[in-house]
Amino acid sequence: MSPPPSFPEFEAAERARGCSEVIARSWEPNQVVGEHTHPFHARALIVEGEMWLTRASGTEHLRVGDRFDLAPGTPHSERYGPQGATYWVARTNPS
């Protein structure tokens, strides 16, 4: 397994794929975000902590190095672990 990219490497790769915005998001320990959707496509890389992402296909337990991809309008909920979590996310707004 290759080492994870740095934030600048992640950002450069995602911008090359055409994303509109790349940011770091951090969440408090044990935080829960109820079901919601986003108007943008989101591709993310977990860089600290852990989270559980639930969508119609089931729940994924994501840890450092894991990635997730959400199409615009996908209903989902999030739960963060006892140390919280940080992920880098590339957002692509529909044209």
Image (spheres, rainbow, N blue to C red):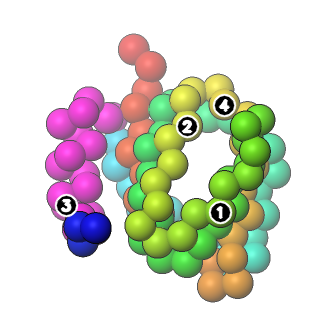
Residue at mark 2: 70
Q: What kind of residue is marked 2? A: Leu
- Label 1 element class: strand
Tell me where residue 94 appears, x and y as whole percent. Answer: 44, 19
Residue extent of the magenta highlight: 4-20
Q: Are marks 4 and 2 in contact (CB under 8 Å)?
A: yes
Q: Which tag is nearer the camera, tag 2 or tag 3?
A: 2
Q: Amino acid at mark 1?
A: His
Instruction: State the SS at label 3.
Output: helix
Q: Residue at x 40, y 32 (%)?
A: 92
C-alpha separation, residue under disc 2 versus residue under disc 3: 22 Å
What's the residue at 28%, 67% (across, down)?
1
Place of residue 33 in the rendered image (x, y in percent of width and height, measured from the top left)? 76, 57
Mark 1 vs mark 3: give the one in front.
Answer: 1
Disc 4 versus disc 3: distance between alpha carbons?
27 Å
**CA separation in Å, label 2 and label 1:** 15 Å
- Give yes or no for residue 19 being in the magenta stretch: yes
- Front: mark 2 or 1: 1
Which residue in the structure is indicated by mark 4?
74
The residue where tag 3 is placed is: 8
Looking at the image, is mark 1 or mark 4 nearer the viewer? Answer: 1
Q: Amino acid at mark 4?
A: Thr
User: Residue under circle 1?
Assistant: 61
The disc, 4 or 3, on the residue closer to the chain's N-terminal end is 3
- Whether tag 4 and tag 3 are in contact, CB under 8 A, the answer is no
Q: Is residue 91 above or below residue 66?
A: above
Q: CA distance from mark 4 to mark 2?
A: 6 Å
Label 3 neighbour load within 10 Å: few <14, some 14-19, many 20+: few
Q: What's the CA distance linking mark 1 and mark 4? A: 18 Å
Mark found first going from the N terminus, 1 or 4: 1
Give the mark, 1 or 3, whose residue is nearer the N terminus.
3
